Amino acid sequence: MTLPVRVARGMDPFDALHRETDSMLSRFFGRDSDSSWMAPYAVDIHEDGDHIYVEAELPGFKKDKVEVTLENGTLTISAERKTEKNGGQEGQTLLRERRYSRFLRSFTLPPTVDENKVNAKLADGILSITLDKREESKPRKILVQ
């Protein structure tokens, strides 16, 4: 079961601090390509009258390594990227900056979302998720007589 996480409006300074600290500690302790660390990939969320849109930067992640789940009003995006030793090439590695990375974010959705109408697409390193709103929650015009 996934614990819900609130989606904060605006930038959370502690989130950026956490990512920077994690990155600094990873470099300091010399973690190699087999180690796990959370990559700081950005997510944007916006809405209109009919949909909620989630866009997540996932550069280098393959479609079969990205998982999107929706359970009990919580949207969870997870992805994993592994690199081969020596990049699949023969010889000695001289520089390795591409590492194993994973992405995991969860968002609590409002009750207006129709959990049966969700579309996800990964193109050019951007995961785009479109969540339809329930018909009864969409704004409608009332005729004034």
Image: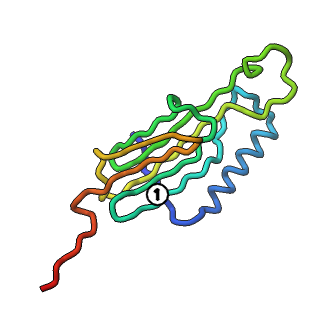
Residue pointed to by mark 1 = 6
- In the rendered image, which quarter is residue 69 located in? top left
Relative to 110, 34 lies left or right: right
Q: What kind of element bears circle 1?
A: loop
Q: How far from the left and from the top, in percent, is residue 38?
A: 63, 41
Q: Residues within 10 Å of mark 1 (few under 14, many from 20)?
A: few
State the residue in front, 103 or 48. Answer: 48
Name the colour scheme: rainbow
Tell me the kind of residue under disc 1: Arg
| Up/down of 95 relative to 53, above or below | above
| Up/down of 14 relative to 91, above or below | below
Q: Residue at x 59, y 35 (%)?
A: 61
Q: How far from the left and from the top, in percent, is residue 116?
A: 28, 44
Indicate the quadrant containing the C terminus: top left, top right, bottom left or bottom right.
Answer: bottom left
Q: How far from the left and from the top, in percent, is residue 77?
A: 48, 42
Indicate the quadrant containing the N terminus: top left, top right, bottom left or bottom right.
Answer: top left
State the residue in front, 74 or 134. Answer: 134
Relative to 143, 66 lies left or right: right
Q: Residue furthest bottom?
A: 145
Q: How far from the left and from the top, in percent, is residue 126?
A: 55, 45
- In the rendered image, which quarter is residue 141 located in? bottom left
